[in-house]
Amino acid sequence: SFYLLTGAGQIARNGDEIIRLIVNNAKWVFLLALPVILYFFFFRKSLSQLGDKKTEGIKLCGLASLFFLVLHYSMGAFPPQEKRISDLYFYTNPLVETTREFGLVSSLGIDLRQRIFGEPIPKELIKEEKYEDKYIEEGKAEEIFYHENIPLEKELVQEEIVIEPQILDIDFKALEKQRESETLALLDGYFAFLEPSYSNEYTGIFEGYNLIFITAESFWWPAVDQELTPTLYQMIHQGIHLENFYNPIWTVSTYDGEYVGLTGLLPKDGVWSLYRAAFNFSPQSLGWRMDAANYNCYAYHNHTYTYYDRHESHPNLGYDYKGLGSGVDVQVQWPGSDLEMMEITMDEFLDKEPFHVYYLTVSGHGAYSFSGNAMANKNKAYVEELDLSEEAASYIAANMELEHALSYLLARLEEEGLAERTLIVLNPDHIPYSLSEEAMEELAGSFSREIDRYRSHGIIYTPNMEGIEIKKPVSSLDLLPTVYNLLGLSYESRLIIGRDVFSEQGLVIFYNRSWLSEKGYYNSRSEKFESMVEEEIPEGYVDKINQEVKEKFYFSGLLLEEDYFSYLPEKAFSFQKKE
């Protein structure tokens, strides 16, 4: 996007990867360059003899403008089965999808139009009235129908468990009526219609625990093996085992992966969402909320601390942030060592309970080769006996450094007597997309590009806990509200896109607006739904979820752009101590 071009200089730090991709795709680069080559060697002279260049240029621009206008105004007249195309063109503009449908130049044209004139509000975005079926832990409550006229303060008591909404004191309907801004009123109206998450039998079971939250670079399920990575295996299977955990990829890779994990919101297409949030009031972001609960909050990164302007975004999220060049003096190599980062930093917080620590790792980063990846080369001996190509084996070797780091982390916590009161959460930032398709299939076997590609492992673990299995589909969006629920922290669940994994609904949302629920998978590109259950799918179910997904993307982006939290009543966030 034009916005991301402002940070294009940082791409140069991935020069080796860029060169590798160009070489691997040389035949396609040549074909793209062929018209230019033909022009200079064959047609330039003949074209120069066409006559008055200025007149011809005006004619050409006029024809191009006419073509664009015809295309633009006819797009809205597409038949219903082409509604997705119209939505992409006028409203949503996820760049990968619009490029697939219209081409790169047209996609950038849509982006430029929206940057100049603003993003239009999709038609029929909010219905006049919404009902939703709500279930509270199978066998614990009857089916309940909620409507806006039923007070949210109503408590349901079932088997000695008090079930109450995870909300704050915000009257969205009253705010909507008072707003002078139509945009803010639109946001108020949307959140007024949403149903919240509810407390459950796991609410507050880790109240008062220390929290270590890790965003793991390029972490993917094939990196875990019971014998090769016993610590990772134990944390995944003996903690809260998220059996169907997915890690969708977003437009700004690691930075968006962090944004999802730290805010529970969908990133906005084509911008650095976490950097935008650096200038917003962010009371429900992880560091800010933990700081308000009187935790000592630290953040560490074993790569350049200014990369993606994290020196601005992370302090605003409530952290005392340090990285390479600012307090985390790991050896300068590519990629840096996760183990070394933890060895350097842990003494800073172990005696400062309660503490919340955010680690952003980098050891698992591509490119994957023993000669070009310091961590793969360091851990080469662990994978030499594996029947894998160098690329696939290098990925496993690079992730061995995360295994060593977590082993060290658990050992230090145990040594200090902190292990049994520290909750550890791991959020993968994205799949290892720099792996070739061949290497991915070596590691994972054959898989569907649309769904299985994004299956991964998330970790919610504390030593000596009894394993809990969550079978429904969940994603990285759901980690933050789950943490708040487990720690017993108040929050406004209607202002978080993800859902506590113990709540009633399992829904995984993908970048291209496809989605996976407990009932099946919807492919937005083919506009087809594949049922995964034996019972009949309720009439209107797919359309209902499609509408919800569209709203979640739109309003999550609007919440960020408008700094919406700063326009909510101050008393609603009375748990906050920040100014």
Image (tube, helix red, strand yellow):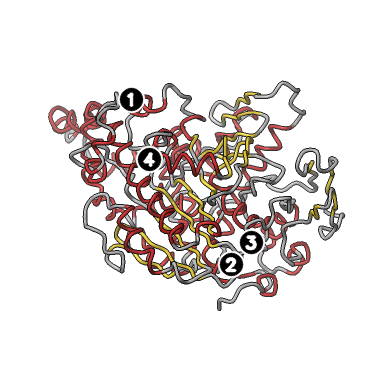
Provide the residue designation for mark 1: 438
Residue 215 — which label?
none
Categorize mark 2 by other alpha carbons within 10 Å: few (<14), some (14-19), many (20+).
many
Camera-side mark, 3 or 4: 3
Q: Residue at x 33, y 37 (%)?
A: 434
Provide the residue designation for mark 3: 207
From this view, report whether residue 21 is shown above or below residue 527. below
Q: Secondary structure at mark 2?
A: loop
Provide the residue designation for mark 4: 105
Residue type at numbered disc 1? Glu
Provide the residue designation for mark 2: 283
Camera-nearest residue between 317 and 14: 317
Distance, label 2 to label 3, CA atoms, is 19 Å
Of the image marks 2 and 3, the number of the one nearer the N terminus: 3
Distance, label 3 to label 4, CA atoms, is 52 Å
Q: Identify the image quadrant of residue 382.
A: top left
Q: Residue at x 83, y 43 (%)?
A: 141
Label 1 near label 3: C-beta < 8 Å?
Answer: no
Q: Position of residue 100 (x, y in %)?
A: 44, 33
Rendered-image quadrant of the C terminus:
bottom right
Camera-side mark, 3 or 1: 3
Q: Identify the image quadrant of residue 299.
A: bottom left
Q: Residue at x 29, y 23 (%)?
A: 387
Categorize mark 1 by other alpha carbons within 10 Å: few (<14), some (14-19), many (20+).
few
Q: Secondary structure at mark 1?
A: helix
Q: Identify the image quadrant of residue 16.
A: top left
Camera-nearest residue between 116 and 193: 193
Label 4 near label 3: C-beta < 8 Å?
Answer: no
Of the image marks 3 and 1, the number of the one nearer the N terminus: 3
Residue type at numbered disc 4? Val
